[in-house]
Image: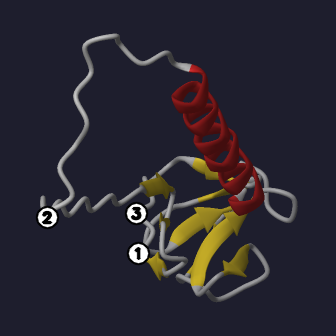
Amino acid sequence: MLKKVSIVLSVVVVLGVGFALVSPTPVDAKEKKQDQNVVVQKKTVVKKNNVVVKKNNVVVKKKQVYVVGQKYNGNVWLGHKRHRWNGVWYDYGIGPCWINVNGAYFWNLLACPY
C-alpha cells in the first residue's frame, strides 16, 4: 500500500512540475526582486488505516480503531470480551477460535464460523 501511495505522489509531483514548465508567462509579468525573503513550507500527509506518511520519510503509526462486528481480513473483531460458540464460552484470546493479528485477537471464521 505504501508503494502505491509513493507512486501516486510521484506522478502528482511530475505533473505539477510539467505544468509549471509548459505554462506561458504573461507579457506584463514583472521580474521578482532578489532581496525578498520568502519561506515556503509544504507538508504532505497521507493517512491510510493506521499509518501516517510524511514527506520527509518519517512514518508514524497510530493505534488501529476496530469496530465490533466488522470483518478485517476474513476475521471478525468482537472486542475484548468473551464469545459463545457451539455452547462453549471462549474467553478473549483463549481457545482455537481466536487468532492473534498484530497484538489483537480476532474471531477466526475459518476455525469457528457463526
Q: Is residue 113 above or below residue 99?
A: above
User: How far, Cα to Cα, is label 2 from label 3?
Assistant: 44 Å
Mark 1 residue type? Lys
Name the residue rendered at 25%, 36% in the picture: 31
Name the residue rendered at 47%, 54% in the picture: 46
Q: Nearer the viewer, residue 92 or 74?
A: 74
The residue wearing badge 2 is 37
Label 3: state its secondary structure: loop
Name the residue rendered at 64%, 89% in the picture: 94
Q: Nearer the viewer, residue 45 or 50?
A: 45
The residue wearing badge 1 is 62
- Residue 28 placement: quadrant: top left
Q: Is residue 74 above or below residue 21?
A: below
- Residue 83 placement: quadrant: bottom right
Mark 2 residue type? Asn
User: How far across and how far down the image is residue 51, in percent?
Assistant: 51, 68
Horizontal side of residue 105 vs 41, given as left or right: right
The residue wearing badge 3 is 65
User: How far across and how far down the image is residue 73, in percent?
Assistant: 74, 55
Q: Residues within 10 Å of mark 1 (few under 14, many from 20)?
A: few
Q: Residues within 10 Å of mark 2 (few under 14, many from 20)?
A: few
Label 2: state its secondary structure: loop
Which of the image's four quarters has the N terminus? bottom right
